[in-house]
Image: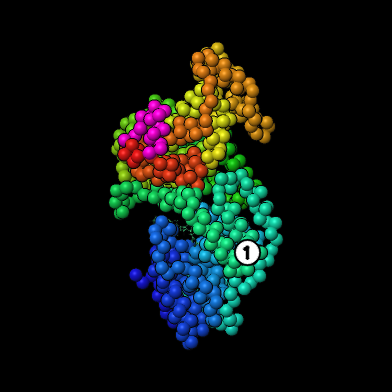
Amino acid sequence: MQSVTTHREGEILVILVNNPPVNALSWHVRQGLKDGVEEALNDPTIKAAIIRCEGTTFIAGADITEFSQAPKEPALGATLDAMETASKPIIAAIHGTALGGGLETALCCHYRIAVPSAKLGVPEVKLGLLPGAGGTQRLPRLVGVEAAAAMCSSGDPVPAAKAKEMGLVDALAGEASLAEDAIAFARECIAKGPRATRDLLVKGDLSVIEQLKTANGKKWKGFEAPYANLACVEAATRLPFDEGMAFERTEFMKLMMGSQSAAQRHMFFAERQAAKIDGLPKDTPLRDIKKVGVIGAGTMGGGITMNFLSAGVPVTIVEMQQDALDRGVGIIRKNYENSAAKGRFTQEKVEQMMALLTPSLSLDALADVDLVIEAIYENMDVKKEVFGKLDAICKPGAILASNTSYLNVDTIASATSRPEDVLGMHFFSPANVMKLLEVVRGEKTAIDALATAMAIGKKIGKIAVVAGVCDGFIGNRMLSKRQGPANALLMEGASPAQIDNVFLEFGFPMGPFQMGDLAGMDIGWHRDPTKIDTLRDAMCAAGRFGQKNGKGYYDYDEKRNRTPSAEALVIIEDFRSRSNMKKRDVTDQEIVERCLYPMVNEGHLILEEGMAQRASDIDVVWIYGYGWPVYRGGPMFWGDLEGAGKIVEALERHGVKVAQSLKAKA
Ligand code: T1G
């Protein structure tokens, strides 16, 4: 496999990498780089060398697929050392992205030239890792402690122009003339001679490291990698280069062998896998989505609309009443103006996006759109009536989607003469923020309609996952398997705080009872304080609706900080005795077994029924829609780590019917 070739441009050797799709540092690329550098160093007529890549990007990092295999020769380190200590200048010519091991390779070059659209970064922390090929030791030497600490701990790339300001890039090439400009630049570098990054002094203020930890304490809670990255950058300020490299190696291997990185690498591929529809013929043409219609200008309708306006897609938004329409459009504008005020984009951009919005009081306005997303309240008869009307109004080939979060999409489709054009597009609130989109495939949904919905989901910045028609699709279906046991454990003696703390310790942003208080306990309440059949009735009867009125399972201050509530505990205790429940000690392990294990079990049932294409899709749903900690890889990945045997034993002990496939795994 010839993924690296070389050619001469006079006294310059060009080492060209071509390993689609992202020029990852697979073993054969490492071999090719090694051979190319040796060729450059061993031929006295060569005065300088350039490393450049074919395709859309410079080297986007180590080959992540190799991490779960036995290490293959040659290792990268030796080649990088040979480059850095070379007696003639080596230049990195960068386009697209120089990421991870790719940037580390560029750091071992003596000079870097990049096109203005290029991005440079060390995203390893997003894989639960750190730049393990010298990035944490060479970056501080080139860009200073502050910038290096920020780049390593955030994993976010910097654009070429900023990289130039930071000293990470030495020159900018023409956007379409990198090859030529790199040659010219290399000729200039011959005179300057090589400049090894390792020989540069580390400059900058070390206090940035503690500042970053303080500023990101909440965001990094439970994660190991951000702290390991900062420890390595800190080490670079006090250790000689080789000792710093050894320190980095040790920290890197700890992370590489750990479960967190395994989980985050799993997620890297799971996200990309989720976009694929099994059995979709490669040449399936997608339908052209130029104009979109949204029915309902409430919270969900407004958020959904913003996704399309932000992506430059015109939207016609339909409401029944003028005041509701005005309110909905007003909220969209306010949200954009708030973002503009935070500098996310200009007021001019706000006007551009709002100009793409057409408010209407009539469904007839949707006659010419390519996709309709219905986001009205959850009532089957009303939805069927609306889809019946859309069937008559919308042009042939228009996709008719419902944002229902649990109603039967096939039943909705049966209200039309074109069920093949009907599917679910289940957004998560706030719809303009949450990345997850469940695309619900109906029994008769045409595969090109499904593929189009998945593609448009990606276009508006969502992680789209295919779900089958069942109660609660993937996410809510599994959520219900957690909520029931949580309520039961409360009755048996656990407190809301004990249960929620188990979830917080696990890494969720909040537990089931905090979520209940956030959503509001009076949603759907019958409003009769004398009628108390459930604990929720008892809470509502006592006027405890949740965060919205400062009291629910917890008490809340004006900043919505929660504290355990004596009154809530009394209400729970009363309801227990009313239900003749005997209070007993509940262990945290029991809470995990009865709240999380049933979710893993339900995931297996969802796969058995074909309601999800693959287990990793379920993990994507829970990480992007329900706050499952990414460093635990999602319920299915975690279930495998936890061990099917252990889970089956506990489920049976707690009287839960175990999925055949889970039993088989055990
Ligand atoms: N290794 C293997 N495969 C990779 C890969 C990689 N580094 N990057 C991408 N792919 C595959 C991906 O799975 C997909 O495959 C296809 O390429 C296109 O990717 C020692 C240890 C570069 C910004 O973390 O961020 O270096 O689904 O859909 O949207 O310190 O890919 O088509 O079969 O994402 O245009 C550090 C990871 C590695 C960068 C392009 N590097 N990649 O985005 O395409 S660790 C990263 C990306 C490391 C060293 C350490 C993005 C991209 P398939 P895509 P894209």
Is residue 250 in view? yes
- Image coords of residue 347 (percent x, y): 62, 49
- Image coords of residue 14 (percent x, y): 46, 77
Identify the residue position indicated by label 1 in the image. 236
The residue depicted at 55 percent of the width and 50 percent of the height is 224
Question: In the displayed structure, would residue 385 be above or below residue 49?
Answer: above
Magenta stretch, residue numbers: 645-660
Question: In the displayed structure, would residue 431 be above or below residue 525?
Answer: below
The residue depicted at 40 percent of the width and 41 percent of the height is 643
- Quadrant where the C terminus sits is top left
- Image coords of residue 166 (percent x, y): 63, 65
Dividing the image into four quarters, tell me where ligand 1 lies: bottom left
The residue depicted at 66 percent of the width and 55 percent of the height is 209
From the viewer's perspective, is 44 left or right of 218?
left
Q: Residues within 10 Å of mark 1 (few under 14, many from 20)?
A: many
Question: In the displayed structure, would residue 88 be above or below residue 343?
Answer: below
Which residue is outermost to the top? 530
Of residues 514 and 625, the one drawn nearer to the viewer in this rendering: 514
Residue 334: quarter of image: top right
Of residues 471 and 533, the one drawn nearer to the viewer in this rendering: 533
Is residue 650 magenta-colored?
A: yes
Is residue 188 in view? no
Which residue is outermost to the bottom? 45
The colouring scheme, among rainbow, by chain, secondary structure or one colour, is: rainbow
Is residue 565 magenta-colored?
A: no
User: Which amino acid type corresponds to the residue marked 1 in the rendered image?
Assistant: Ala
Question: In the displayed structure, would residue 62 be above or below residue 468?
Answer: below
- Image coords of residue 244 (percent x, y): 59, 65
- Quadrant where the N terminus sits is bottom left
